[in-house]
């Protein structure tokens, strides 16, 4: 079945160009012209990916993203028009997966959409493989337990509240324990970013994770920084 994309954009010309190009690529496309409608449509249709403009009538794209992220995990690509918006998206306090700065080419947009959808598909396949190997479904490291099937993490028996990207990063690190993983590799495999050099994003998420899973975040023993190379998860 074709992937379904929700386009949230109040500028009619850009919205129609997006709809035209995405439809031509075979995607199913829905549209919303304001934030409230966007939230409503996501609940109704559960699209596979969202293109989300930031400056919108009603509630803005940041707020829409925050609302959706409470229980919605599909990729969200933000469409930004200003540098200060980019800073906020890159900081990823809002939980977006990627962003494009206007004006962007349709070719670039389609490449990003494809990359995000592929990332999700690979994740899904990995989890499906895991289903077959029950022993791989639960990773245990001295007080830290990851339940890959239920996407749950426990620290010293207590459930941990992780944001979707924090969970994905931790699961990826844990599944590659003992190996040095470069920021580029993490960006590509966890975020699906092949076209941007946003390595700060990785550092920010590692810092957040350490605050949640390390007894002493400033002296980490689980997620180790390997100078000049990246990060390594210690079992
Ligand atoms: Ca707008």
Image (cartoon, rainbow, N blue to C red):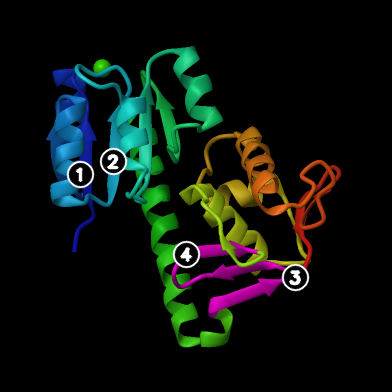
Q: Nearer the viewer, mark 1 or mark 4?
A: 4
Q: What residue is shown at x 16% (from left), y 19% (from top)?
A: 13
> Does residue 65 appear to the left or right of 227 in the view shown?
left
Q: What segment is highlighted magenta in the picture?
A: 137-155
Q: Residues within 10 Å of mark 3 (few under 14, many from 20)?
A: few
Q: Nearer the viewer, mark 2 or mark 4?
A: 4
**Residue tagged 2:** 50
| Mark sitting on residue 142 | 3
* Image quarter of residue 123: bottom left
The answer for how far apart the CA atoms under marks 1 and 3 are is: 39 Å
Label 3 CB, ligand 1: below 8 Å? no
Where, quadrant-wise, is the N terminus in this rendering?
A: bottom left
Q: Is residue 107 visible?
A: no
Sequence-first disc among 2 and 4? 2
Q: Secondary structure at mark 1?
A: helix
Label 1 CB, ligand 1: below 8 Å? no
Q: Is residue 14 visible?
A: yes
Q: Nearer the viewer, mark 1 or mark 3?
A: 3
* Image quarter of residue 21: top left
**Residue tagged 4:** 151
The answer for how far apart the CA atoms under marks 3 and 4 are is: 18 Å
Q: What residue is shown at x 39% (from left), y 62% (from top)?
A: 121
**Quadrant of the picture in which ligand 1 is shown:** top left
Q: Are marks 1 and 2 in contact (CB under 8 Å)?
A: yes
**Residue tagged 1:** 42
Q: What residue is shown at x 76% (from left), y 44% (from top)?
A: 217
Q: Residues within 10 Å of mark 2 (few under 14, many from 20)?
A: many
Sequence-first disc among 1 and 2? 1
Sequence-first disc among 3 and 4? 3
């Amino acid at each position: 079945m074709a992937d379904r994309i929700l386009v949230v954009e109040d500028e009619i010309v850009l919205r129609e160009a997006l709809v035209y190009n995405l439809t031509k690529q075979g995607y199913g496309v829905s549209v919303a012209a304001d934030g409230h409608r966007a939230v409503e449509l996501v609940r109704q249709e559960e699209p596979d990916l969202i293109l989300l403009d930031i400056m919108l009538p009603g509630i803005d794209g940041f707020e829409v993203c925050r609302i959706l992220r409470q229980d919605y995990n599909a990729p969200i690509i933000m469409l930004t028009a200003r540098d200060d918006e980019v800073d906020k998206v890159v900081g990823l306090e809002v939980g977006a997966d990627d962003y494009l700065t206007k004006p962007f080419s349709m070719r670039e947009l389609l490449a990003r959409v494809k990359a995000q959808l592929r990332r999700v598909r690979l994740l899904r396949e990995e989890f499906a493989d895991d289903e077959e190997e029950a022993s791989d479904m639960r990773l245990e490291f001295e007080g830290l337990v990851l339940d890959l099937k239920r996407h749950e993490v426990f620290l010293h028996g207590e459930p941990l509240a992780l944001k979707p990207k924090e969970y994905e990063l931790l699961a990826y690190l844990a599944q590659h324990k003992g190996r040095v993983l470069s920021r580029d590799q993490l960006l590509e495999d966890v975020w699906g970013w092949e076209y941007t050099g946003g390595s700060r994003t990785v550092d920010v998420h590692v810092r957040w994770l350490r605050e949640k899973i390390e007894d002493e975040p400033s002296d980490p023993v689980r997620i180790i920084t390997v100078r000049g190379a990246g990060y390594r998860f210690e079992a």
